[in-house]
Amino acid sequence: MRLETRTTLLKLHRWVGLAFAALLLVQGLSGALLVFREEIEGVIHPALAVMPAETRVPVQSMVDTVREAAPQATLQRIKFAEDPARAAMFVMRLEDDAPWMVAVDPYNGRVVRAGSYAAWPGEWLFRLHDALLAGKTGEIIVSIEGIALVFLVGFGVVIWWPGRRRLKSGFRILTGQGADRTVRTAHRAVGAAIGIVLVMSGMTGALLIHRAALQPYLPVVPRPKFEVALSPETPLRPVDTLLADARSRHGPLPLREVRFSGAAGQVVALYFQDESSRRPNATRQYFYNAYEGVELGRYEPAALPPMNTAYDWLFTIHTGKAGGLSGRLVVLAGGLSLVFFAGSGVWLWLSARRQRRARRAKAENRLARNAA
């Protein structure tokens, strides 16, 4: 590579990295913690661990309990963990659109924990990672950071490339020659080793944020959205009635989530684990009119185009769940590496500035002596 080209790429790599250093630090650290979010929350919130029993409380009974406990909030979804010894999570919104989350023991129906983000640091961390707690503006910033990360890795690999014959030396971290030398070689070697993981993380993250905006331009079938006119005088069918109907039609699949939409929650979406899919978090989704108890439509991965399958894999790949424990550990390493790169990049920049100042001062002193 020509020296001028390498110098230009190095400057671009340095200044893009410095511009995004703080954001990379936040995203890397929050992403690393979120890899094992469920395990961490189990330690932070021991009340989430419940004692499994032979029977569960009806879902509608839990819904009634939660709505009675938080009448000022609107229920949006219920999440059921794969671990039978874990509480069900009810996600709600207050009148000012602030979040409110409630954990319920599915075997006795008792509320075991409730509160806003302050009571759920894992959820707060997810919102920070997802959108910097800044809504759409935060999502745009995070997506730009993802794209910048891809370019940083690309520039870095081109700058680092030692040639095929000296490839092994490119992964060597030199010690005993000063801290700057050690940090610089570590920055390059670790970047080359983990680069593909960071590219995957940046690309999948950006695509997840802009997924809905890109769908009209891709051969995908969008997730169905249904609207049912509000009818305050008509009672809603119990969720368990809808569940029974869905299971009679589609089989006894494990329930993973229930979502409510409409002012009164009159559209209910039932998410069942899709055991026929290779994707760990794949679900079959069935939508119901809660007034009439009739199925409005469905979203079944097996019946969708390949592009839908690819898009549905994005979150699974981004979180590392696609590779089981090994995949999660790889994503953890990627997140921690961003923390290292943010710190080492700033270190190297400050070190270079100190060296330039020292050289300038030395040159000025020499000129002063010569003039004297």
Image (cartoon, rainbow, N blue to C red):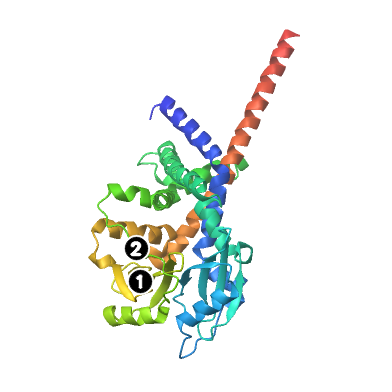
Q: Which x, y percent locates residue 132?
A: 55, 50
Q: Does the image show residue 230? A: yes
The circle on residue 289 is 1
Name above or below for residue 268 compared with residue 244.
Answer: above
Numbered label tally:
2
Q: Earlier in the sequence, mark 2 or mark 1?
A: 2
Residue depicted at 36% across the width and 74% down the height: 272
Q: Distance between the residues labelled 2 and 1?
A: 9 Å
Q: Is residue 84 visible?
A: no
Image coordinates of residue 153 in percent, x first then y, are 43, 43
The residue where tag 2 is placed is 226
Please determine whether, in this image, residue 69 is positioned above or below residue 25.
below
User: Front-most of 73 and 31?
Assistant: 73
Q: In which quarter of the image is residue 322?
A: bottom left
Which is nearer the eye, 337 or 201? 201
Q: What residue type is labelled 2?
A: Phe
On the image, the x and y values in percent for residue 38 come to 52, 69
Mark 1 is on which residue type?
Answer: Asn
Mark 2 burial class by Cα count in 10 Å: few <14, some 14-19, many 20+: some
- Contact check, label 2 and label 1, Cβ < 8 Å: yes
